[in-house]
Amino acid sequence: MRLLPTIHGKNIPVALRMSRPDGLTSLLTEGVAPPEASQSLRAFGWLDEASIARLLDEDAREQMAKLVQVNFVRLATEQGRQSEIDAAVKHWEDLDNEDYKESNRQQVDHIAIKLRAVSRELAPESDHRLEAAFTPDEVELLAEMEHARWVGERLLAGWTCAPKPKNEAKRTNPSPISFP
């Protein structure tokens, strides 16, 4: 609900994975929440047994989260970020902050949502359909969605935007923690 003022009027859909049918889930599904909430927020998980958490067992989810971190470290290193300065730029087993591991897990949990946005789906390896490449517009949309997911995650975890350097103790980050 804290995100609503930030996303109001920006046509940014937010999917919420819920583990129980009470609290925010009941507000959204019973029509009690404000109209802007029901327009922007979608709850899934407790109703939807086919949610990403159900599609992937914990071992597969954890392995995918580790691959997300490997890719992140590669990209961050290419951009000049250093693990001595930035605690996020470390190999999985060296991450001291569980928040970074959980961020990778949440990114994995959001894969199916992003795929649906570009009319794709997760499929088992045994599926013999041809793989479809993403168009440049789809890649841009997926990047925007991932940034919005990350922003929401950071805001809910109490992070704010502040000048360099990043300060984990104060939960400040120089990266844009705002919606486009």
Image (tube, grey):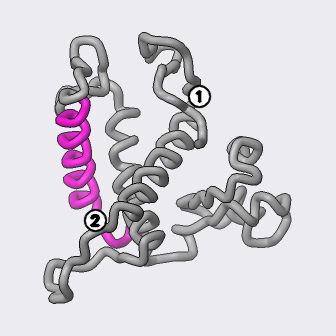
The mark total stands at: 2
Q: Is residue 52 above or below residue 124?
A: above
Identify the residue at image location x=50%, y=48%. 149
Residue placed farthest to the front in the image? 136
Q: Is residue 20 left or right of residue 123?
A: right
Residue 27 at x, y percent in the picture: 77, 62
Disc 2: which residue: 57
71 is within the stretch colored magenta: yes
Which of the image's four quarters has the C terminus? top right
Q: Can you see residue 92?
A: no
Q: Can you see residue 118?
A: yes
Q: Give the residues in magenta.
A: 52-76
- What's the CA distance linking mark 2 and mark 1? 29 Å
Q: Amino acid at mark 1?
A: Gly
**Element at badge 1?**
loop
Identify the residue at image location x=55%, y=16%. 162
